[in-house]
Amino acid sequence: MALMHFDENSFKANLGKPGLLVVDFWADWCGPCKMLGPVIEQLAKDFDGRATVGKINVDDEPELAQKYQISSIPAVLLFKNGTCVDKLIGVQPPENFTKAIERNL
């Protein structure tokens, strides 16, 4: 499955599914978010069939950003069976994201 772009409804639908959900909270105006974009796209390919990977634009979905206390972006949250189990803030080496996903699969 390709990288998903969530709105509130599609996020809630995927949050309710079993398995690992990886969500990048980002914004168009955020330079570090743009730097992280290709990493998130690669994670979606690398973990296709094992995890759902998507993005939420905090400007389009401010309620979700507030609900998950997103104060710095990019912020990548990992959800397992509807519960946030890990959080990575800022641009980091790709292997940090890979390790976090593998640790929570």
Image (spheres, rainbow, N blue to C red):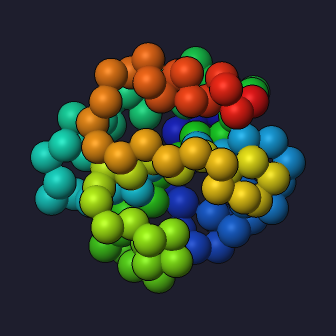
Decide: is 38 above or below 70: above
Does residue 43 appear anywhere in the picture? Answer: no
The x, y position of residue 9, in whole percent, is 64, 73
The x, y position of residue 55, in whole percent, is 46, 51
| Left or right: where 63 falls relative to 72 | right
Decide: is 48 above or below 76: above
Decide: is 102 above or below 72: above
- Quick one: quadrant of the N terminus? top right
Residue visible at 44% across and 78% down in the picture: 66
| Left or right: where 16 falls relative to 92 | right
- Picture mark count: 0
- Quick one: quadrant of the C terminus? top right
The x, y position of residue 42, in whole percent, is 46, 23
Residue visible at 75% across and 48% down in the picture: 80
Residue visible at 45% across and 59% down in the picture: 56
Residue visible at 31% across and 67% down in the picture: 71
| Left or right: where 56 falls relative to 104 | left
The x, y position of residue 44, in whole percent, is 55, 30
